[in-house]
Image (cartoon, rainbow, N blue to C red):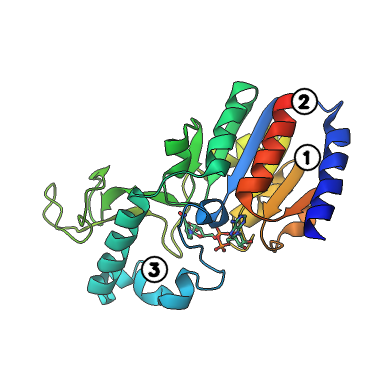
Amino acid sequence: MKIFKNKIQFRALKERIKDYDIKRIVIITGAGISAESGINTFRDNNGLWDNHSVYEVARPEAIELTPEIFFKFQNERAIDMKNKVPNKAHKKLSKLEEKYHVNIITQNIDNLHEKAGSNNIIHIHGTNSEYKCTHCTNKGIYQDNIYGEECLECNKGLLRPNVVLFKEQVYDLYPSLDMIEKADLFIQIGTSGTVYPVAGFPEYTKALKINISLKEPDNEHYFDFNFKGKATKLVSELIEILLKK
Ligand code: NAD
């Protein structure tokens, strides 16, 4: 039934974009695009939040209150992600740059879009391939188990992941909104559509909007086309259509 629905929708999409001028594409990605590379999402069954307390691993206070748990979790996650490889969905997306101006705004802290060869990427929730100091401006490339070590620049702070923890400000919000406003096509992949401000991004554009995810996202109502299923299969089909247009 799902496959059948997707087929009909792909046909309708082809028809819709036949005479539609597409120059700029903005792609929003979430944990779902990396799921088939073996990185757990947050909110699916057996997702990260089922096995860990948000309080101990994902809010800034945890660095002071439960540092051992926080840094152990963050180091294990960074080492695990470092060894993952991009899947077909990441790779196909990078091909779009051959024909269009593409900006990827990812909520993911992994670096699988970079590994797949995409060029214009905003990590709106940061990346754990970098560390930063809790006290000074020291920042650098992650090395195994470096989180939790004392900062050698200021000797005051600790090295933590350069990611946006709960309640912290997202990165590059205004450049993101600018790209979104100028886009002709807006594609959202593998997100639950629950985390703001990203979940509200479709409001800022008149572009044609396409969503791909395993489950309906909470912001589903914004989208002209909603495809349900795995990113590797559906993203590949979508990119083929866009490259042949
Ligand atoms: P989420 O866990 O809330 O939702 C993921 C969504 O992906 C699900 O709703 C599901 O519909 C979809 N999904 C799962 N498997 C899929 C597949 N194979 N193909 C297509 N869709 C699939 O994730 P989110 O919306 O990105 O939540 C936001 C937060 O999660 C972000 O802040 C992000 O930093 C963080 N996160 C990142 C990673 C990562 O870097 N890879 C992993 C887990 C969580």
Q: Could you tell me which secondary element the residue under label 2 belongs to?
A: loop
The amino acid at mark 3 is Arg
Q: Is mark 3 within 8 Å of ligand 1?
A: no
Q: How many C-alpha atoms fall within 10 Å of the one at disc 1: few (<14), some, or many (≥20)?
A: some
Q: What is the number of the mark on residue 159?
A: none
Q: In the displayed structure, would residue 47 be above or below residue 104?
A: below
Compare residues 142 and 152 and report the one nearer the observer. Answer: 142
What residue is shown with label 1?
Answer: 206
Q: Could you tell me which secondary element the residue under label 1 belongs to?
A: loop
The quadrant in which residue 71 appears is bottom left
Image quadrant occupied by the C terminus: top right
Looking at the image, is mark 3 or mark 2 earlier in the sequence? 3
Looking at the image, is mark 2 or mark 1 earlier in the sequence? 1
Q: Of tags 2 and 1, which is closer to the observer?
A: 2
What residue is shown with label 3?
Answer: 59
Q: Of tags 3 and 2, which is closer to the observer?
A: 2
The amino acid at mark 2 is Lys
What residue is shown with label 2?
Answer: 245
Q: Quick check: 5 left or right of 104?
A: right
Residue positioned 50% across, 73% down in the render: 46
Image quadrant of ligand 1 equals bottom right
Residue positioned 72% across, 36% down in the render: 185
